[in-house]
Image: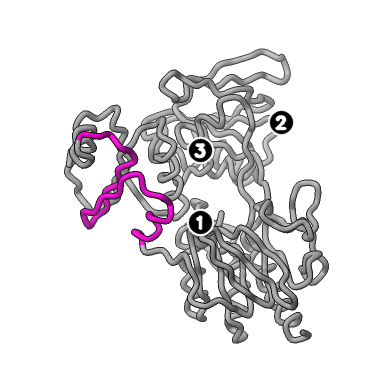
Amino acid sequence: MPQEQTAPEIVVYGTSWCPDCRRSKQFLGEQRIPYRWVDIEHDAQAMAYVEQVNQGGRSVPTIVFPDGETLVEPTNAELARKLGLQTSAQREFYDVIIVGGGPAGLTAAIYTAREGLDTLVIERAAPGGQAGITQVIDNYPGFDEGISGQEFARRLTNQARRFGVEILQAQEVTEIRVNGPYREVSTADGRTYCTSAVLIATGAHYRRLNVPGEEDLIGVNVHFCATCDGAFYKGKEVLVIGGGNSGFEEALFLTRFAPKVTIVEFNEKVRASRILQEKVGGRQDIEVVTNHSVQEFLVSKEGKLAGVRVQDRATDEAHEWHPEGVFVFVGLQPNSGFLPDEIERDRFGFVVTDPTLMTSLSGVFAAGDVRAGATAQAAAAAGEGATVAVMMRQYLEGR
């Protein structure tokens, strides 16, 4: 190999303009699998190594695993198999199927499994949801010194499995439909599972800005997860868009790598909690700029970030900033697009439920950040998970 590894690791060789490289990096990030990225266009030895592996070709991504095996241009399914991820269930029928493995889904699974209900959790990424990629959770009851999101997700997942919950990851649900007294859940690999009750706990994802250049740079220099991609900006200046709790938390995390972090907020005042504002206010390496809107991401001929055009909303004056990377945290959008029309949603796409947390489709429940009225807090999501588990048990008893 072009560089000697000091410890077993996954190495991804690719280029910044390669869409399959971005997809593979996103997949590894979603599964919280650590890896080392090598851009072969800036490393002659890496380029030679890729050509050697591919008999003179430059096929990317070329991914090398600790056991020495190499995958070239792998699909997500091939990566999942190599990583040993369970993507298909052992049976075709379960008492309860939970779509989404965040705090709401896993908590519900713990409660239903303890009640003796066969429970299947299907998670499109890695168990833990958004909480799993949070740097530090310090407002969850019981952790007086805080806990890392990754450790929190690990404990919650292990606890669910200890009670017999079957968990699929790297698997996406594509459809939920009614079949007589049952509900059917179909996945992207073509399989269909049958159940008596479904819980939608798919959470939400960070909204995009939808400005020119954003789509071209996602996964290159525009990111939505500092924990996943912050290490790529060691010694470089970065921009965080969004002055809420997420933006401030991620900015604090990014100072581990970046010598200068700028937070830009659209409104005149930031929305982050007082304690986060105090933490950021005491830092010399974080600057907060309010009342500015991001207008465009400039893309170079090489397909990389060339600049960020912003506008001062008070004076209409335009500016051009030149960070090395951008992290976007401008609110949440529910992961509800796959749901059937029979399930009512509000104008923002959040799922509407009755007092028992059942949706407008009988036998289908919702909890956590995907639900209209949720508070987007891990503790609240866990509470809803416990509540909906009781509601589903009562529903099943009444059938």
Q: Is residue 57 magenta?
A: yes
* Separation of marks 1 and 2 at Cα, in angstroms: 32 Å
Q: Which residue is mark 1?
A: 125
In the image, is 48 to the left or to the right of 292? left
Residues 27 and 250: in front is 27
Is 259 rendered above or below residue 334? Answer: above
Q: Which residue is mark 2?
A: 267
Q: Quadrant of residue 381?
A: bottom right
Q: Which marked residue is nearer to the observer: mark 1 or mark 2?
A: 1
Q: Which residue is mark 3?
A: 223
Of the numbered discs 3 and 1, the one sitting upstream in the chain is 1
Q: Is residue 358 magenta?
A: no
* Separation of marks 3 and 1 at Cα, in angstroms: 17 Å
Q: Quadrant of residue 172?
A: bottom right
Q: Which marked residue is nearer to the observer: mark 3 or mark 2?
A: 3
Is 354 rendered above or below residue 46? Answer: below
Rendered location of residue 44, percent (x, y):
21, 28
Q: Which residues are magenta?
A: 56-83
In the image, is 346 to the left or to the right of 114? right
What residue appears at the point 45 percent right and 33 percent down from the top-left corner?
A: 220
Type of amino acid at the residue the image marks with label 2:
Asn
